[in-house]
Image (spheres, grey):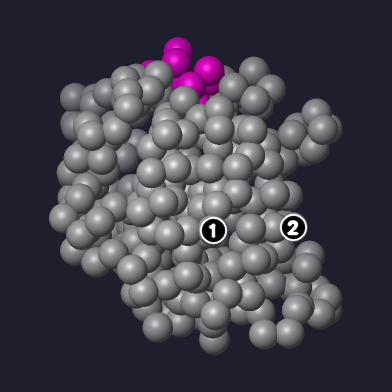
């Protein structure tokens, strides 16, 4: 398991955004062939690489969205651009802040299902800020602070234990010190579309999450009537439990 974590984290740190061409593996009959993965705040798209590698080897066409994190509209636009390039039914997946993005962008007719992984799932009129204030306080949430320009970061001293306690300490520390800022205007912007009302929904709950409280995750999953799966992982469960997360995405690919 440690070897897997180290190899997955090494890919994450490498900064590669490439997903290899799908192999000739035959997908289940009726499955959506396309998977679009949307990352959260403070990290980049390579946080999805371990999951992407698993799905690509199984024959799925996987796209990693590169969120600018400069505004909510910019991130939604990046996701819509990725969806526009898909041919046919597509599963749209969001981690953390990415859940807000897919809630807005997921009304695209190509999107056949939504998957939330330790993610916020707002209702129309709600923002990340309002959901954070309403939910149970967490170690990670309390460690989010703006810099002089209004960009939000997680305190690097708190990041390893709050975000990635189940990754090797040196990897967690590196991630803490190489965070990508989330502009505060994105944090405060409300959604005006809630695509989960009209799509099959799936939710991966991380039971040891210290950023988005597991109780809040369960509440989101219940509200959107999602098929839920629990993993005993931190907020970085998409890396630590990549196999289980990929399995949920495969289930979503078969949703009608």
Q: Residue furthest top?
A: 157
Q: Is residue 156 magenta?
A: yes
Q: Is residue 218 left or right of residue 68?
A: right
Q: Position of residue 42 (x, y in %)?
A: 42, 37
- Residue at 19% x, 25% y is 148
**CB atoms of marks 2 and 1 within 8 Å:** no
List the residue tagged with mark 1: 227
- Residue at 44% x, 42% y is 218
Q: Residues within 10 Å of mark 2 (few under 14, many from 20)?
A: some
155 to 12, vertically: above or below: above
Tell me which numbered mark, 2 or 1, is placed earlier along the sequence.
2
Q: Position of residue 1 (x, y in %)?
A: 82, 33
Q: Is residue 91 left or right of residue 24?
A: left
Q: Position of residue 192 (x, y in %)?
A: 19, 63
- Asked whether 104 or 171 is in front, the reply is 104
List the residue tagged with mark 2: 54
- Residue at 74% x, 57% y is 54
Q: Quadrant of the C terminus?
A: bottom right
- Residue 147's tag is none
Q: Is residue 227 left or right of residue 179?
A: right
- Residue at 28% x, 64% y is 194
- Give the SS element for disc 2: helix
Q: Marks 2 and 1, how far apart in space?
A: 21 Å
Q: Is residue 36 magenta?
A: no
Q: Which residues are magenta?
A: 155-163
Hey, which quadrant is residue 57 in on the image? bottom right
């Amino acid at each position: 398991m440690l070897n897997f974590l180290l190899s997955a984290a090494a890919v994450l740190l490498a900064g590669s955004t490439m997903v290899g061409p799908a192999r000739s593996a035959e997908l289940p009959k009726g499955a959506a062939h396309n998977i679009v993965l949307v990352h959260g705040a403070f990290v980049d798209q390579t946080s999805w690489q371990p999951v992407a590698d698993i799905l690509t080897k199984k024959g799925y066409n996987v796209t990693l969205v590169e969120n600018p994190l400069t505004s909510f509209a910019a991130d939604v636009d990046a996701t819509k651009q990725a969806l526009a390039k898909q041919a046919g039914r597509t599963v749209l997946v969001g981690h953390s802040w990415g859940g807000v993005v897919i809630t807005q962008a997921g009304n695209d007719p190509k999107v056949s299902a939504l998957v939330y992984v330790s993610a916020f799932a707002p209702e129309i009129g709600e923002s990340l800020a309002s959901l954070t204030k309403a939910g149970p306080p967490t170690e990670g949430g309390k460690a989010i602070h703006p810099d002089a320009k209004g960009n939000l970061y997680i305190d690097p001293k708190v990041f390893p234990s709050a975000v990635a306690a189940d990754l090797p300490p040196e990897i967690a520390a590196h991630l803490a010190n190489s965070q990508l800022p989330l502009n505060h205007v994105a944090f405060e912007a409300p959604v005006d579309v809630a695509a989960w009302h009209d799509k099959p929904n799936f939710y991966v709950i991380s039971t040891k999450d210290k950023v988005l409280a597991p109780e809040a995750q369960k509440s989101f999953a219940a509200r959107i009537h999602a098929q839920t799966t629990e993993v005993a992982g931190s907020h970085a469960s998409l890396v630590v439990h990549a196999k289980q997360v990929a399995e949920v995405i495969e289930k979503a690919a078969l949703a009608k």
